[in-house]
Amino acid sequence: MSSFKMTGVTDPGRMRAENEDNIATFPALGLAVLADGMGGHQAGEVASRMAVDVISRHFQEVFTRHPTGSGNGKSLEQRTIGKAIELANAAIYEMAHQRSECAGMGSTIVVAVFYEDKVCIGHVGDSRLYRLRGGKLEQLTQDHSVIEELVARGLLSREEARQTIGKNLVTRALGIDPFVAADVAELPREADDLYLICSDGLNDVVPDPDIEGLLASGSQDELWPLAQRLVAVANERGGPDNISIILVRPGERFARETSAVSPDVEAR
């Protein structure tokens, strides 16, 4: 399986009138971006949209000027993810301090860039990136949340964490402080890997074993119906939050097309 496939969907869920998630996919660039906003008076939607817009624009500019390259022991993709997240954080922080209606707004972020036989991942907050390999699901990002810290210290089990009130309290987010530390990793990938990027509107109500079963049993050549099924299951289980999903089947070695930079899924 050698063709690159990417699709994304975002849904307000059953309990929220507004959707504060934003996503964008750029299959030609191998780029996927997902943000889950937070803040009152619809400021969360502003923050997540800014995050996706700033990051997408930076990648388009860099990849148009420099199709490939490395420096300081890091790939172009690693350096670009770090800089893009830095720019998004600064833009949201500035807006939050300029406009009273945006005070306290912030956003999670997950950025994934697929190139050659690798994937580069950057994230802040508790939105996630998973990989399905050989029928087994693995979370490749670690939540920046109070609950995750308690689990890491052995004070809560995973099941207890799922049932805990306040499990969505993040310890890092874009726009809260002048600077934010993003986790950036570059990993090898295999031709049959399937990647899932999601906001917590999915994994808060659909446990990992269920997500694994849905991904493993679905037609992975047809990503759009699979993404829609994941959203439907989250809504069937109450849909208490916005639900955003990006699925990527990168296939074998991937070469981006820098002449084509328009997203398939527009940042809302």
Image: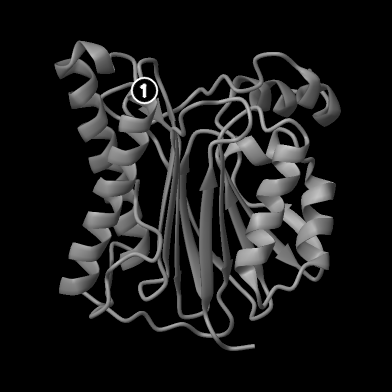
The three-letter amino acid code for the residue at tag 1 is Gln
Quadrant of residue 16 in the image?
top right
Tell me where residue 229 appears, x and y as whole percent: 71, 55
Q: Is residue 152 left or right of residue 9?
A: right
Indicate the position of residue 86 as horizontal and vertical percent values.
Answer: 28, 41
| Residue beneath the point at 52% across and 69% down | 6
Furthest toward the bottom, the residue is 2
Image color mode: one colour
Q: Is residue 70 left or right of residue 222?
A: left
x%, y% of residue 95?
19, 25
In-front residue for pair 211/115: 211
Determine whether 255 is above or below 126 in the image. below
Where's residue 11, x and y in %? 54, 43
Q: Residue at x 54, y 75 (%)?
A: 5
Identify the image quadrant of the N terminus: bottom right
Residue under label 1, please give it. Answer: 42
Left-right relation of 259 to 181: left
Query: Is residue 117 left or right of 75 when viewed as pictured?
Result: right
Determine whether the residue tagged by mark 1 lies in a helix, strand or loop: loop
Asked if one can make out residue 169 in the rendered structure from this viewpoint, the answer is yes
